[in-house]
Amino acid sequence: MPERTTVIAGLLLAAGAGRRYGRPKALVELDGEPLVRRGVRLLADGGCAPVHVVLGAGADEVPELPGAVPVRHDRWSDGLGSSLRRGLASLPADVPGAVVVLVDQPLLSPVAVRRVREAYTAEAVVVATYAGRPGHPILLCRRTWPLLNRYAVGDRGARDLLRERPELVVEVPCDDVGTPVDVDTPADLLRLRRSAAHEPPG
């Protein structure tokens, strides 16, 4: 199937303090690369443009992000939902949708980003699934953004929207192109470093 030409933005949520990890996970490195830069590369390689990055805790320590627009969020401590809404609000008015990923899931694949992006419609939320369960990346069409004022609160992003509005959801299986495993602690990162397969297919 030919790739659709609709230009979809990328949104990387990287504002959290990483309390369980002990430092902001945006600054944590895997293979010598900060997770925040890895996330930018993931979205860019998946065909997203522009790419915006929501920064909060440790924002002054984040390295330059070539090819991305940093978005400061002073209320990052309000939770993931607040960061999601801040990031979407920062995007240009002509963007029809945004692929959202989290900075602490470094094994997501550009292939998954492309699959989700190519399934875009103006009426749906497109979500990658793994073993039948929803994960990231997730594509939120602009029509759904106002709904997040209700659903994206505290540390909840779009999860409640997916559950309560299934008629809006299109699922795209991505089991074969990576995994949405979280890096929550240094032990999690060590396991990834010991894995010979931690670079997802591109």
Image: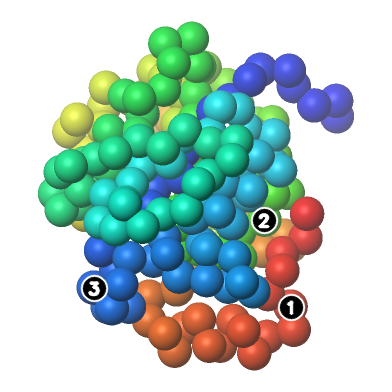
Residue 134 visible to the viewer = no
> Percent from the top left, x then y, of residue 65?
53, 44
| Secondary structure at numbered mark 3 | loop
Residue at coordinates 77% horizontally, 60% vertically from top-left?
Answer: 201
Task: Tell me which label, 1 or 3, sits earlier in the chain.
Answer: 3
> Percent from the top left, x then y, of residue 67?
60, 36
Residue at coordinates 41% horizontally, 60% vertically from top-left?
Answer: 26
Where does label 2 land, which residue?
109
> Percent from the top left, x then y, of residue 119?
65, 31
Task: Tell me which label, 2 or 3, sits earlier in the chain.
Answer: 3
Q: Is residue 182 above or below residue 94?
A: below
Where does label 3 land, which residue?
19
- Place residue 140 in its image quadrant: top left
| Secondary structure at numbered mark 2 | loop
Task: Tell me which label, 2 or 1, sits earlier in the chain.
Answer: 2
- Left or right of 176 in this view: 130: left
| Secondary structure at numbered mark 1 | loop
Which amino acid is tagged 1?
A: Ala
